[in-house]
Image (cartoon, rainbow, N blue to C red):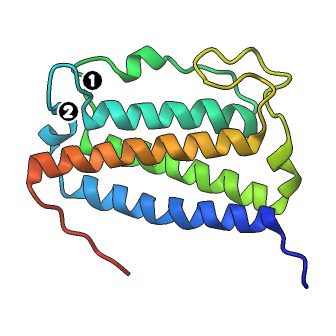
Amino acid sequence: MDFVDVSALFIDSVLSKVIPERKWFVQCIEQLDEEDITWAPTNESNSIANLVSHIRGTVHSRIEILLFDIPDTREREKEFEKGLILTKEQVLRIGMEAFNLIIQYLEKMKEQPQLLTSQPYLKKPALTYSAFNNETTAMNLLIQMVREVHFHTGQIIYIAKMRKGELKWKYD
């Protein structure tokens, strides 16, 4: 029996979910008007602008700090400010940045699969807004981040359907 590289299978599996999700995100946002971006279903709900800002913040804290060794400048509370104004163009750019960073991180893991079991936060300041501690593995962080991004992308699509009634999808 041939040895199966489980790390490569895992990374390819995650990529096979993230790449189409990026496409759905773009298709969804492209069908919206500017006012749809900042609309929230209720006073307690988040707008698409809030959700995309939060996705970008999550990717910043989970990937950019590790990949590029930049300081944590995230202001999580601002991601959820009521009345957050972002244009459709900004939402597309910010969302694409987040998805592209996830894909870049996965590609790096593919080249160096041993990084999956690394503990990238060990020498970083304590995590303050995470369910994880600094001893968690890169694989655990990746799973949690992709799950969270998927969850919020679903919310974005749901809000878009509330606004438009129906969305048109291109499958290729």
Is the Cβ of the residue at disc 2 closer than 8 Å to that at disc 1? Answer: yes
Q: Residue at x 56, y 67 (%)?
A: 16
Vertical placement of residue 18 versus 88, above or below: below
Q: Furthest residue to the bottom?
A: 1
Vertical placement of residue 10 versus 52, above or below: below
The spot of residue 46 in percent (x, y) is 27, 28
Q: Helix or strand or loop: what does disc 2 sit on? A: helix
Residue carrying label 1:
84
**The C terminus: image quadrant:** bottom left
The spot of residue 2 in percent (x, y) is 90, 83
Q: Residue at x 69, y 31 (%)?
A: 65
Q: Residue at x 72, y 68 (%)?
A: 9
Q: Helix or strand or loop: what does disc 1 sit on? A: loop
Marker disc for residue 18: none
Does 140 sit left or right of 20 as displayed? right
Q: Furthest residue to the front?
A: 1
Figure quadrant of residue 145: top right
The spot of residue 163 in percent (x, y) is 10, 46
CA gap between label 2 and label 1 equals 7 Å
Total labels drawn: 2
Looking at the rendered structure, the kind of residue marked 2 is: Thr
Pick whichever of labels 2 and 1 is earlier in the sequence. Answer: 2
Task: Report if residue 68 is visible in the image.
Answer: no
Other residues around mark 2 within 10 Å, as few (<14) / some (14–19) / many (≥20): some
**The N terminus: image quadrant:** bottom right
Marker disc for residue 38: 2
Q: Residue at x 19, y 48 (%)?
A: 160
